[in-house]
Amino acid sequence: MGSDPQLDAIMDMGCDTMQPRYMFSKDFKVSIPTREDWKRGPKRQQDSLIWYTDGSKMNSGTGAGVYSKQSEHSESLGRFATVFQAETYAIIMCAVRNIEQAHKKRDIYILSDSQAALKAIASVRVGSTLVLEAILALNKLGRHNRVTLMWVPGHTGIEGNERADSLARQGSEAAPIGPEPIVPLSISTVHMAMRQYTSRKHRAEWESSNGMSHSKLFLVGNTRSWEKLILNGNRRQARVITGALTGHYTTNHMLHKMGLTTDDSCRACGEHAESMKHLLCECDALARTRMGLLGSAYPTPEEYRSFSPKHLIHYMDRIFVDEGG
């Protein structure tokens, strides 16, 4: 496909996905109580250490936050980390801080509002390097302490969770320290980069190609709604949509160009040449029909990009009734 500096840079950063590894032995517990359990108050040992962790992703970036009554910390994870990675990284941060404090024989609760992160850490099958790092850190902490990861309902006014959320947002707004990525790229980030690259290439080829003047009025780059209908629909639907968007249909103007008719005038108004653009956008005699089926009496080609493909098929069926759609 050729070289693209942005895609090449992303591919060089490394991916979070790894060969699955199976972790059967874990020196910590994962608890996901119900919301009703939280209303009654979760059961925890007295004199236990309680930590709250959270992750946040904003337009400015991604951040992780850790909070307890004794300590709090936030960190920027840059532009590329996902929310799941931020939630997992926050748990790693919390485990590392507790390891550094050299706790022994303590009851330590790490609370997170991300069930996805907790379930990934609890799973026997591990396919993420970041999740593996979290498990190893928690195992190290759990060898000398009783460690429990617990789900906490988010945005319900629980003070510790709200503070962790605020710290995570601070981290997402801050500039990262050091080169990016801070954490390995998730497979979804890699896939998105590849989709964006192929979309840019497709659009550049489309815009630089010769001809197809009618199609270029109605289509710009990839148009997913049309594509899905053409690929998943039946042959008749594909023929109608393709004819409308390319202009290659049995209009009088097209038949006249092919020498199959001597009259190219519009069958509806009889005043103008019956091109597909005229039928779709301009014909006065069909304005009421377009308003009823498409919601616009004189739509521009650009407006068709947001119309439902099925509505366009109904409109084409109305025009070319003698053709059987």
Image (cartoon, rainbow, N blue to C red):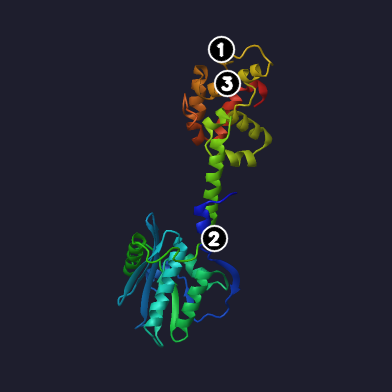
Q: Judge the density around disc 2: few (<14), some (14-19), many (≥20) Cα neighbours within 10 Å.
A: some
- Residue 91 at x, y = what percent? 43, 72
Tag 2 secondary structure: helix
Residue under numbered circle 3: 275
Q: Which mark is residue 53?
A: none
Q: What residue type is labelled 2?
A: Ile
Spatial CA span between label 3 and label 2: 47 Å
Say which quarter of the image contains residue 87.
bottom left
Residue 139 x %, y %: 49, 80
Q: Earlier along the polypeptide chain: callout 2 or callout 1?
A: 2
Q: Mark 2 points at which residue?
A: 187
User: How many numbered discs sit on the rendered protein?
Assistant: 3
Q: Which of marks 3 and 1 is in front?
A: 3
Q: What residue type is labelled 3?
A: Ser
User: What residue is at 45 percent from the left and 74 percent from the top?
Assistant: 149
The answer to the question of whether label 3 and label 1 lie on touching residues, with beta carbons closer than 8 A, is no
Say if residue 144 shows up in the picture: yes
Q: What residue type is labelled 1?
A: Gly
User: Residue 82: x percent and y percent?
Assistant: 46, 60
Dot 3 lies on which element? Answer: loop
Could you tell me residue 283's position as x and y percent? Answer: 51, 19
The answer to whether residue 222 shows anywhere in this view is: no
| Relative side of 129 to 60, left or right | right
Q: Earlier in the sequence, mark 3 or mark 2?
A: 2
> In the image, what residue occupies the spot 50% across and 76% down?
135
Q: Name the residue under label 1.
A: 270
**In this rendering, is residue 274 above or below 40?**
above
Q: In this view, does 140 lie to the left or right of 66?
A: right
